[in-house]
Image (cartoon, rainbow, N blue to C red):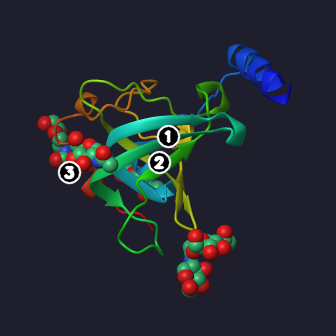
Amino acid sequence: MFFCYLLIIFAIIPSISVCLCAPSPVNATFCQADWVSRVYVNSTELLIEKHIRQYTVTHLEVFKYPSNATRELSPEIRTAPFDSFCGVMLELGGDNEFLLSGKESNGTLTMEICDQIVPKPKNVELKWEKYPVNFTETLESIECD
Ligand SMILES: *[C@@H]1O[C@H](CO)[C@@H](O)[C@H](O)[C@H]1NC(C)=O
Ligand SMILES: *[C@@H]1O[C@H](CO)[C@@H](O)[C@H](O)[C@H]1NC(C)=O
Ligand SMILES: *[C@@H]1O[C@H](CO)[C@@H](O)[C@H](O)[C@H]1NC(C)=O
Ligand SMILES: *[C@@H]1O[C@H](CO)[C@@H](O)[C@H](O)[C@H]1NC(C)=O
Ligand SMILES: *[C@@H]1O[C@H](CO)[C@@H](O)[C@H](O)[C@H]1NC(C)=O
């Protein structure tokens, strides 16, 4: 029964709420993030009972590490289950390289739509191929206070 309610709630809410992010320059989004990484997404899993979507990734190029962390990021990244809950929905298949950023807490990586550095304003498709060719240099040149 409980599971049934969950299904109903998840079926209705996505259509009535939206996640809105205030526009933010690349360097501000980068500086607010705990971690920024170009990743290959190996798999995704929807953990309904925990209300999370979890991606398992391979970190290809890390642009920012959490300040206190060892120089190693967890392969697991958690987000909300749907985009209406500000979850990051990645379209998998073909070339699964994405630029992702988010928060870290005690080794657990999380992310929301508004944490993301987007290739173009309002384009939340985070495929690496959508970013300018020299975006690696752009990210490496950012200085945060
Ligand atoms: C982002 O860059 C602009 C222009 O270079 C600068 O004025 C601003 O302070 C930077 N923001 C952060 C968070 O570093
Ligand atoms: C994830 O995919 C990458 C690239 O194809 C591969 O090198 C890596 O072994 C995969 N990792 C897992 C855990 O499957
Ligand atoms: C980093 O670690 C130090 C010492 O363990 C701790 O005092 C500090 O609060 C930590 N900072 C963050 C941002 O977690
Ligand atoms: C942080 O993670 C460690 C190891 O997974 C765990 O033992 C500890 O309880 C966690 N601390 C907090 C505050 O969640
Ligand atoms: C990236 O390329 C553009 C156009 O070629 C150039 O204007 C910009 O300065 C370059 N940025 C970096 C960080 O190299």
Which badge, 3 or 2, is on the more N-terminal residue?
A: 2
Kind of residue at badge 3: Glu
The residue sitting at 80% across, 21% down in the picture is: 4
Q: Quadrant of ligand 3?
A: bottom right
The residue wearing badge 1 is 24
Residue 75 percent coordinates (x, y)? 40, 54
Q: CA distance from mark 2 to mark 1?
A: 6 Å
Q: Say which quarter of the image contains residue 15.
A: top right
Residue 142 visible in this rendered orientation of the protein? no
Q: Position of residue 52 (x, y in %)?
A: 62, 40
Q: Which mark is residue 130?
A: none
Q: Is mark 3 within 8 Å of ligand 5?
A: yes
Q: Answer yes or no: do the residues labelled 2 and 1 have beta carbons within 8 Å?
A: yes
Q: Which mark is residue 137?
A: 3
Label 1 vs 3, first from the N-terminus: 1
Disc 1, SS: loop
